[in-house]
């Protein structure tokens, strides 16, 4: 008995050491390989005075899904890092931003509670850098009642793009999938086409609908449009369907772990063949290339914002701010860029305002008035505007895996979506693309 | 359509379900605990292997460490919770392990983010064609291991003193204690063995399916279906059950019209077996009592 006890205690301690050393090792991944190095000017956020803001704090909040199996916290984390940088540089004309975010744990009831809480706290002037995977619809109900507006970092389901008080900085899975399809179309590789997605309401079906409509309109033969169960363990049937359909190219619109499993099954069946495999921005992250292995050299992904290694004023500032103000192990991915950009848009919208008069009403007015916002992280100007749907980011870039890492394959391209006609119309008629 | 690849994939996954099922069954028979945390322990072992390999550890050493970690987690739980669990009914025992499953899942989600991870065992890189189906060495290992573990467990139960003690406990716990069986030692061994089996299954499943905490944790459902088919008694029937669930799932998923229901196969099979078995058990108990 004692021997077993001692042996197991030793094993337990060993396992603990491994787990702990794992945590230590992750802290090494702070900086991005292949990215230009930062200089001091990159940390001149907001007013860039270099002096700490000491005035009355301005309260800003966010709701994000950080636990429950999906972790989108990189968006509010980078927003917080940017606000910290602004606070060290004179704040909003002397007033610091006090930022907090609530985790809805992938539970829409919790999203509604958090949203209602922030909506009822009138000292919260705006929501910035949100990233809820489940609750845009319920959150919007609360925001609308309270006249609160959200510059959302990351929106995924349809509701995030079809809400009056929510405007995401990212492009979303539907635009990302269409961008991939249209990239192949430009290369003459999209016919026939195959799409793989997740059978989730308001998300997978929304993406599939976009692909069906676009392929029909463009005269592309859609030989497969498969939505799989999120709990699926066996991707062999899917891979067999792909093999039988023999498309010229295909897009996987799944979360990265599921995409990796599909690719592993395809590799095991040696099903890559002449098919051009690609995925949406969900698998555009540094770890993905390493994980799927050399078999997938040449694998294509969409990127909803600039590549994480890109050179540019905002791209450089994002990396510098993350290195200086965020945890070393905070992800440096598209969602992180999105949260950073949401915070930057917010700060830039508030700086011209009268500091004494900052309340929810004046801030909402300023946020709604954002138009023609330019950033090298984006492909086209971003705007808010009063509308029942917000989908300003509809131009993206493409990346390809070379030697296990993503490099740029194609620069900015506008993405056509048959359902976006009204949005494009409004952009022009209301002059939303110019300041 | 060539169904052979589906049968092969089904047999492989099924054999790992069966392997897991054997671990669950041995623990259940010895301690009376139906371990809902079996999948979570396997998930933890798989993620530890992934992490240590990422840290440049030799894969065989990492795998050994993962299996040992699985054994250690289960053993520690048995050591700490075992004495209290021995005094409560089976439902509460099972619920306690559900707590462990959720705690382990929480730890995994906390330590590892939701980015893509893949586990590629070296044996998965060697593959060959069998009548139009691609088979790799890991898949053969899965099948062989399931068979080996069933036979090994049967032999161990029959021919070792620990096995005899386990059988004594399974048959009548009180009586076994009265005649001098070291109940705690036997139970702790069962926890450790079951944890090691969970570790092995977790690593194999991560290679064959998905390396995700929640996914691996909830694979306990098809694994339990295998045990239910074995009617919580028979190792051979558990093996058959695991294979049946695996192949059933795979074949259902082969046809697009019904493929959406493939994840329901374990429930359907288990429900049918429970319905049939319950009817028969009522009769048996009646006869014994009479």
Image (cartoon, helix red, strand yellow):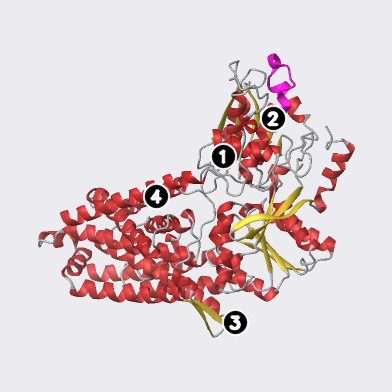
| For the residues bearing labels 4 and 1, Cβ distance under 8 angstroms | no
The answer to if A381 sits in the magenta stretch is no
Name the residue carrying label 1: A109
Asked if residue A288 is positioned above or below residue A128 in the image, the reply reads below
Residue at (62% x, 35% y) in the render = A39
Residue B244 visible in rendering: no
Question: Where the N terminus of chain A falls, by quadrant?
Answer: bottom left
Q: Which residue is mark 4?
A: B104
Magenta extent:
A347-363
Disc 2 chain ID: A
Measured as percent of width and height from the top left, residue A109 is found at 57, 39
On residue B134, the disc is none
Circle 3 Cα neighbour tier, 10 Å, few/some/many (<14 / 14–19 / ≥20): few
- Asked if residue A150 shows in the view, the reply is yes
Cα gap from disc 4 to disc 1, whole angstroms: 24 Å
Between disc 1 and disc 2, the foreground one is 2
Q: Main secondary structure of the magenta part?
A: helix
Q: Which mark lies nearer to you, 4 or 1?
A: 4
- Whichever of labels 4 and 3 marks the residue nearer the N terminus, that label is 3
| Image quarter in which the C terminus of chain A is found | top right
Q: Give the SS element for disc 1.
A: helix
Q: Which residue is tagged 2?
A: A346
Q: Are marks 4 and 1 on the same chain?
A: no
């Amino acid at each position: 008995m004692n021997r077993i006890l001692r042996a197991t205690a030793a094993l337990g301690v060993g396992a603990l050491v491994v787990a702990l050393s794992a945590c230590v090792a992750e802290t090494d991944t702070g900086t991005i390989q292949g990215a230009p190095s930062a200089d001091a000017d990159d940390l001149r956020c907001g007013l860039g005075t270099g002096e700490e803001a000491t005035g009355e704090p301005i309260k800003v909040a966010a709701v994000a899904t950080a636990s429950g199996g999906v972790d989108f916290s990189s968006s509010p984390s980078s927003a917080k890092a940017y606000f910290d940088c602004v606070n060290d540089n004179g704040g909003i004309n002397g007033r610091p931003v006090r930022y907090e975010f609530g985790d809805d744990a992938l539970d829409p009831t919790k999203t509604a509670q958090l949203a209602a809480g922030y909506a009822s706290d009138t000292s919260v002037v705006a929501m910035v850098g949100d990233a809820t995977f489940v609750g845009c619809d319920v959150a919007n109900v609360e925001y609308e009642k309270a006249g609160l507006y959200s510059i959302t970092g990351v929106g995924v389901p349809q509701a995030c793009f079809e809400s009056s008080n929510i405007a995401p900085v990212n492009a979303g899975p539907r635009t990302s999938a269409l961008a991939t399809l249209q990239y192949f179309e430009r290369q003459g590789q999209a016919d026939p086409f195959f799409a793989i997605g997740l059978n989730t309401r308001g998300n997978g079906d929304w993406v599939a609908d976009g692909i069906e409509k676009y392929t029909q309109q463009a005269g592309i033969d859609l030989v497969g449009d498969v939505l799989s169960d999120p709990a699926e363990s066996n991707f062999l049937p899917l891979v067999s369907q792909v093999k039988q359909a023999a498309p010229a190219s295909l897009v996987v619109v799944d979360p990265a772990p599921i995409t990796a499993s599909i690719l592993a099954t395809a590799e095991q069946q040696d099903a890559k063949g002449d098919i051009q495999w690609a995925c949406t921005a969900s698998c555009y992250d540094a770890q993905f290339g390493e994980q799927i292995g050399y078999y997938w050299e040449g694998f294509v992904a969409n990127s909803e914002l600039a590549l994480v290694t890109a050179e540019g004023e905002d791209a450089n500032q994002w990396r510098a701010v993350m290195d200086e103000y965020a945890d070393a192990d905070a992800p440096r991915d598209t969602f992180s860029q999105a949260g950073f950009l949401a915070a930057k848009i917010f700060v830039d919208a508030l700086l011209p305002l009268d500091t004494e008069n900052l309340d929810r009403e004046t801030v909402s007015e300023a946020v709604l008035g954002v138009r023609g916002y330019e950033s090298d992280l984006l492909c086209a100007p971003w705007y808010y505007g009063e509308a029942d749907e917000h989908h300003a980011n509809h131009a993206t870039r493409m990346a390809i895996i070379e030697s296990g890492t993503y490099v740029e394959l194609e620069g900015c391209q506008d993405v056509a979506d048959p359902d976006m006609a009204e949005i494009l119309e409004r952009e022009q008629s209301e002059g939303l693309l110019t300041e | 359509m060539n169904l052979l690849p589906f049968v092969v994939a089904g047999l492989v996954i099924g054999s790992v379900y069966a392997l897991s099922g054997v671990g669950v069954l041995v623990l259940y028979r010895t301690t009376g605990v139906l371990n809902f945390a079996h999948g979570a322990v396997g998930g933890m072992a798989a993620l530890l292997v992934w992490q240590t390999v990422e840290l440049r550890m030799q894969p065989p050493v990492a795998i050994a460490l993962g299996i040992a970690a699985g054994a250690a987690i289960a053993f520690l739980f048995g050591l700490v919770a075992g004495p209290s669990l021995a005094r409560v009914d089976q439902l509460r025992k099972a619920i306690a392990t559900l707590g462990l499953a959720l705690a382990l899942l929480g730890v995994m989600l906390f330590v590892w983010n939701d980015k893509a991870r893949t586990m590629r065992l070296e044996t998965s890189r060697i593959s060959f064609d069998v009548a139009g189906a691609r088979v790799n060495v890991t898949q053969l290992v899965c099948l062989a291991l399931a068979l080996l573990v069933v036979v090994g467990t049967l032999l161990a139960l029959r021919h070792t003193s620990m096995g005899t003690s386990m059988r004594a406990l399974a048959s009548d716990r009180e009586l076994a204690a009265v005649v001098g069986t070291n109940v705690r030692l036997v139970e702790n061994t069962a926890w450790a063995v079951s944890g090691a089996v969970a570790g092995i299954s977790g690593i194999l499943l991560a290679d064959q399916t998905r390396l995700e905490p929640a996914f691996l944790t909830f694979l306990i459902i098809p694994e339990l279906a295998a045990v239910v088919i074995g009617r919580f008694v028979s190792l051979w029937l558990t093996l058959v059950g695991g294979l049946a669930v695996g192949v059933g799932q795979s074949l259902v998923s082969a046809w697009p019209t019904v493929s959406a229901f493939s994840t329901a196969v374990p429930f359907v099979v288990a429900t049918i077996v429970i319905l049939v078995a319950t009817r028969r058990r009522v009769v048996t108990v009646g006869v014994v009592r009479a």
